[in-house]
Amino acid sequence: MITDGGLNMDKFDVGLFGERFAELKASRKINVMKLAEALGVNHATVSRWESGKLRPSIDSFFQIVQFFGVHPGYLLGTHDVVK
């Protein structure tokens, strides 16, 4: 079991994460290149997260949480409330 801050990353639903990540990105009207730059990753990585093809590392996950100002459980699918 991979945990960080009390979150169980073993139950990470990459598809749901991708959907919610894409919704957040669209709601902020930020493109892939700018988001990749802000998170310090390659644009292809952002695209793979968004499509549900790649699970972010724990460090990247928490960078995403901070960038969007959301509750970690929202991206994990354990909370339906964004904040």
Image (tube, rainbow, N blue to C red):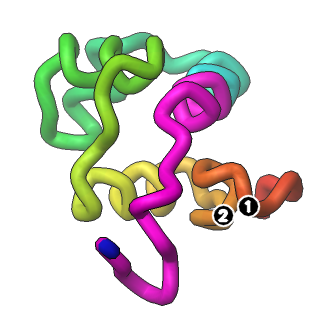
10 left or right of 24?
left
Residue 83 percent location from the top left of the image: 77, 64
> Residue at (42%, 50%) from the top-left corner?
64
Residue 20 location, quadrant: top right
Seen from this angle, which residue lies furthest bottom? Answer: 6
1 vs 21, nearest the viewer: 1
50 left or right of 45?
right
Q: Amino acid type of disc 1?
A: Thr
1 vs 62, nearest the viewer: 1
77 left or right of 33?
right
Q: Which residue is mark 2?
A: 73
Quarter containing the N terminus: bottom left
Q: Amino acid type of disc 2?
A: Gly
> Residue at (20%, 30%) from the top-left corner?
37
Identify whether 11 is placed above or below 41: below
Q: Which residues are drawn in magenta?
A: 2-21
| Tally of numbered discs | 2
Q: Which of pointers 2 and 1 lies earlier in the amino acid sequence?
A: 2
Cα distance in 3D space between marks 2 and 1:
5 Å
Residue 81 percent location from the top left of the image: 87, 57
Q: Which residue is mark 1?
A: 78
Q: Badge 1: few (under 14), some or many (20 or more) residues near its Cα, within 10 Å?
A: few
